[in-house]
Amino acid sequence: MTTLSLSNTTPSTDLQDITTAELTNVTGGFSVTDAVNAGNAGAVTGAQVGGVIGAGVGAVSGGITGGTAGAAAGGVGAIPGALAGAAAGARTGATAGSAIGGAAGWVIGAGNNAGHQLGAW
C-alpha cells in the first residue's frame, strides 16, 4: 500500500545572504564598483571638456547678443556690448558646459566599463 503524507511546513520567501567573499569566487562576475569608478573618472574629464566647449559657445552667443543690443542702442555700444556679452556668456557657458560634460562623461565612462565587463566590446 502506498502512503501519502502532507507536510505542514511553510515555504520560505526569504533570500539567502551571500557574502562578499562568496561573490569574489564567481568567475565572470560584474563589478558595480569598477563601473562607478570608471564613471567618476570619466566625469572629471567630461566636466573639463564641457567647460571649455561651453565657455566658447557661451562667449560667441553672448557676444552676438550683446553686440546686437549695443548696436540697437545707438551703434557705438556694439563693441562694448559684444565684449560684455561675450564675458558673461563665457561664464554661463562654462558653468553649464561643466555640468553637462560631467554627466555625459560619467555615463560614457561607466557604460564603457560595463560593456567591457559584459563582453559587449
Image (spheres, rainbow, N blue to C red):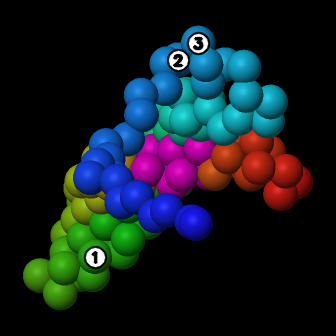
Residue 58 counted in the magenta span: no
Quadrant position of the C terminus in the picture: bottom right
Which mark lies nearer to you, 1 or 2? 2
Query: x and y percent of residue 108 in the render?
Result: 62, 51
Question: Secondary structure beneath disc 3?
Answer: helix
Q: Residue 78 carries which label?
A: none
Q: Which residue in the protein does label 2 denote?
A: 20
18, above or below 3, in the image: above
The reply to whether the magenta stretch includes residue 102 is yes
Provide the residue span drawn in magenta. Answer: 101-110
Cα gap from disc 1 to disc 2, whole angstroms: 57 Å
Looking at the picture, which amino acid does disc 3 mark? Ala
Category of crowding for the residue at label 2, using alpha-carbon neighbours closer than 10 angstroms: few (below 14), some (14–19), many (at least 20)? few
Asked if residue 104 is positioned above or below residue 78 in the image, the reply reads above
> Residue furthest toward the top?
21
* Residue at the disc numbered 1: 65
Taking the spot 34% from the left edge, 53% from the top edge, the residue there is 7
Confirm whether residue 78 shows in the render: no
Residue bearing the label numbered 3: 21
The x and y percentages for residue 67 are 29, 73
Task: Judge the density around disc 3: few (<14), some (14-19), many (≥20) Cα neighbours within 10 Å.
Answer: few
- Whole-Å distance between the Cαs marked 3 and 2? 4 Å
User: Residue 51's image quarter?
Assistant: top left
Q: Are circles 3 and 2 on residues that touch, CB within 8 Å? A: yes
Which residue occupies 80% across, 45% down?
116
Residue 28: percent from the left, percent from the top?
A: 79, 35
- Amino acid type at circle 1 is Thr
- Which quarter of the rendered picture does the N terminus lie within? bottom right
Judged from this view, the residue extending furthest toward the bottom is 72
Between 50 and 63, the one nearer to me in the picture? 50
